[in-house]
Image (cartoon, rainbow, N blue to C red):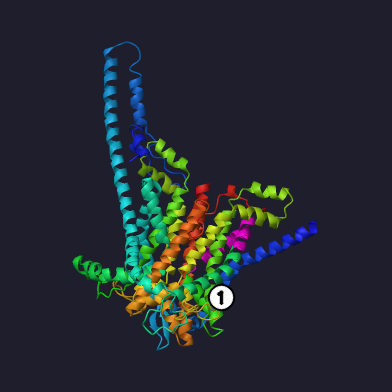
Amino acid sequence: MSDPGDEVDELPAGGSSTRPAADPRPGVPGVPGASGGDAEGVRSAAGRPGGAGGSVVATEVAASASRLQRLAADRAGRRARRRQRRARRMTALTALAAAVTVLPLVSILLFLVVRGLAALGPTLAPTGSAVTPAAGTAAGFGGAVAGSLVLLAIACGLGLPVGLGAGLWLAERRGRRRAALVRYLADVLLGVPSIVFGIVAWQLLVRPVGHFSAWAGGVALAAMIVPLVARTADDVLAQVPTALTEAALALGYPRWRTALGVVLRAALPGVVTGALVAVARVAGETAPLLFTAFGNQFWSVHPGRPIAALPLRIYTSALSGSPAQRAQGYAGALVLVAGVAVFGLVARRATRDRLTPATRLGAGPLTRPPDERHGGVPLA
Amino acid sequence: MSARRSGADRVYDGALALCAACVPVLLAVVAWELARGGWPAFARFGAGFLTRDAWDPVRQSFAVAPALVGTLVTALLALALATPLALGVAVYSAELAPPRVRTALVLAVDLLAAVPGVVYGLWGLHVLVPALRAHVMPALRDDLGLGRTPFFAGPLYGPSILAAALVLAVMIVPFIAAVAREVLRAVPAAQREAAFALGATRWEAAVQVVVPYAASGIFGGVMLGLGRALGETIAVALVVGGAHGFSASLLAPGYTLAALVANEFGEASDDLHLSALMAAAAALFAVTLVVNAVARWLVGRVGREADA
């Protein structure tokens, strides 16, 4: 293993035991190996052996000094070896943690592939279209895939523009108090459990009308998309160099054209990734759809009626006693995971490091960007 | 010319302000509708709704203390299991792993973080729960003798608080690990290099320099994981067992607020039952709101101190 740590390990001969433990002050990291004075002392004692004259005293001092030095070097070597052993041990421990973490993934993928692939052939075909499925038989989940697409279309149609607009607004007002408040509220909205959106959409869009509908489900999903897209867009737009905006404004561009044609364009890959992440996240949501889209055994893409969705179908099939429906659920889960994974890979390719840490996961940025990253859009 | 320009700009500003206003409005609507929907139940049962153990739709008596406790216990247990593991993975994949392993690990963790909750639930129901019932639970209760404590006593059903906590832990490990890894990777390389130059091993550099530098972000990631665990609905609903009432045993089935709402909302027939479920959702909303608000505030505070 090419480990830079190993090579430089011997440098601070001695004294590393006096290294302070992790510095208590946050942000001022404890500096390891802040070499103590004892090695220094030994060296200076050996360096100035008693001054002038080749007297016996001088040779003895020199000899004892070199003995001390050897001793110190020995101790330092032992210490260094101990520290290296510790590093190797802890590395192995964290690698073990990684293995334990990946274990469920292996189990889940095996489970999905083994049980899902077998069921995939007969069920993926868009049967279930217009045909009434007999109770307990697999209806095929072509209708569920179509329903999910309709729901996502509604959610994106409503959520993406609003989220993007809010993101632009936030980026333009970076550093202002009102923007900080809206940003905070968007973060809070990100943390709201998805079932809460389902309940509220039911209360507002299903209860008064008297029946479930794709609209209600789409709106519930859109409410989840808005803060996600707003925060990622805000984050990415803030990274566009201020010089770009200033140049556009100096050339006489109006502010709206500067924002949309220059700044947004420069940040487009990041904004697109944010949108992809948001869509992938809500595509797998079940809870907001339980009492809004409700699900549908039949093929339907009518937005005013109850509509099937892949996650919903997986959920109901998991609770079903019929082996055929269960098999369908496994196949559906396999398709859903594959779809989300492909989406995620595309998003990753599209951006690389354009998004700050947590935004890529749809968690919203964790810390406020530092002040020097000010800018992006002309401040209103 | 300039008048027209300012007109277009005004339209643009107005449109953006409208979009931005959607964020507070959405939050207000959610809070208002939950309060409105849950009000009859709150008005009837008062504070007892949160503190008593009585969920009986037939007798029109509703109180969510067991589900509230179930929510907190499953989420905190999951967090306790997930955090050390997730931090280990994050440190390994950001600092210690050889490049090839790192790439594969990052991919696997990100994939895990993207798997929908319902798939975790399906896996939990059909793989994890049978394994728990057949091997883990008997081992915990009988072989280890933990059955003598009230926390691991009682019959083994499979679906249980323990199963819910484990599924939640499996769900939030990749989430926390991914957030923490990204935060660690954002630490300036100069910090690491300075540590190496002073003779630190990779492990020492990671733990004494990089992790403290990124502490606030990591903490934020952990709190976000807690928020997820509190609000997760479907995966928990599938494995928690759905039993009302208190039980000290982790092996007994239970309920969480989200699972309660998901399971009963569809079949609630009368208004008081519906209202009680809305009130349960409102309680869940309040809990996650507090957790998230505190987390963001703490992260912001620690971040500021680090900058200073």
Left or right for A265, reference A306:
right
Q: Is residue B122 visible?
A: yes
For the C terminus of chain A, the image quarter is bottom right
Relative to B80, A372 lies left or right? right
Q: Which residue is identified by label 1?
A: B32
Residue A172 falls inside the magenta stretch:
yes
Which quadrant is the N terminus of chain A positioned in? top left
Q: Say whether residue A303 is magenta.
A: no
Number of marks present in the image shown = 1
Location of residue A76 by image quarter: top left
- The magenta stretch spans which residues? A164-192
Q: Is residue B45 above or below residue A105?
A: below
Q: Which residue is pictured at 34% across the width and 30% down the height?
A: A38
Chain letter behind tag 1: B
Percent across and percent down for residue A136 are: 36, 82
- Disc 1 marks a residue whose amino acid type is Trp
